[in-house]
Amino acid sequence: MDKRPVLGLDFVGVISDYPEFFEILSNLWTGKVVVISYFDSKEELEYHLRQFNIRYDKAIAVPHNTSKAKIIEDENVDYYFDDSFSNHNDLTSKVGSFLVRGDGNFDFGKQLWRIDSKWRDNSNGN
């Protein structure tokens, strides 16, 4: 049984916003790489992964408004990167989750996070 940790990545707002970083990370990662993202088709997702030279073992296109938590659990993901707060909420404590900040979830000018479709000042933990 392979004991190397499994890396999980979202595409939109993660790989798409920081392609150089995730190209390096995915190609240096010694374990399995699973990309789980909201796309209409697996083929479309794989096309974009090839464009950014992302190494992956499995690409999973998820219907919009579907929780990714069960998929992450089923794929035994150990570390997961996503730009949406809601995709971190239902993860078990065994998954190390990393929130990626970008234009879609953070207003750099106003220093506000986008949480549940609302812009909020989270500097004091609220």
Image (cartoon, rainbow, N blue to C red):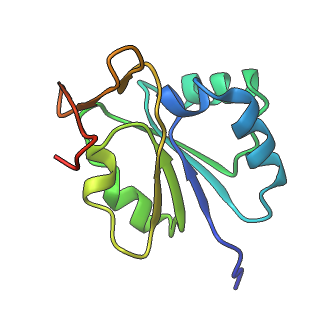
Q: Position of residue 13 (x, y in %)?
A: 48, 27
Q: Position of residue 31 (x, y in %)?
A: 73, 65
Q: For the view shown, which residue lies furthest in the top direction? A: 109
Observer-nearest residue: 101 or 19? 101
Count of numbered labels shown in the rendering: 0
Observer-nearest residue: 71 or 113? 113
Determine the image quadrant of residue 50. Answer: top right
Observer-nearest residue: 40 or 122? 122
Q: For the view shown, which residue lies furthest in the front direction? A: 124
Q: For the view shown, which residue lies furthest in the bottom direction? A: 1
Query: Residue at 54% of width from left, 68% of height from top?
Result: 78
Determine the image quadrant of residue 21. Answer: top right
Query: Residue at 54% of width from left, 62% of height from top?
Result: 79
Q: Where is residue 65 in the image (x, y as percent from the top left)?
A: 23, 35
From what the image shows, is residue 120 above or below residue 96? above
Query: Residue at 75% of width from left, 30% of height from top?
Result: 20
Q: Position of residue 94 (x, y in %)?
A: 43, 76
Query: Residue at 39% of width from left, 57% of height from top?
Result: 71
Screen quadrant of the N terminus: bottom right
- Say whether residue 41 is left or right of residue 105: right
Observer-nearest residue: 87 or 48? 87
Determine the image quadrant of residue 95. Answer: bottom left
From what the image shows, is residue 119 above or below residue 99? above
From what the image shows, is residue 75 above or below residue 53? below
- Say whether residue 112 is left or right of residue 57: left
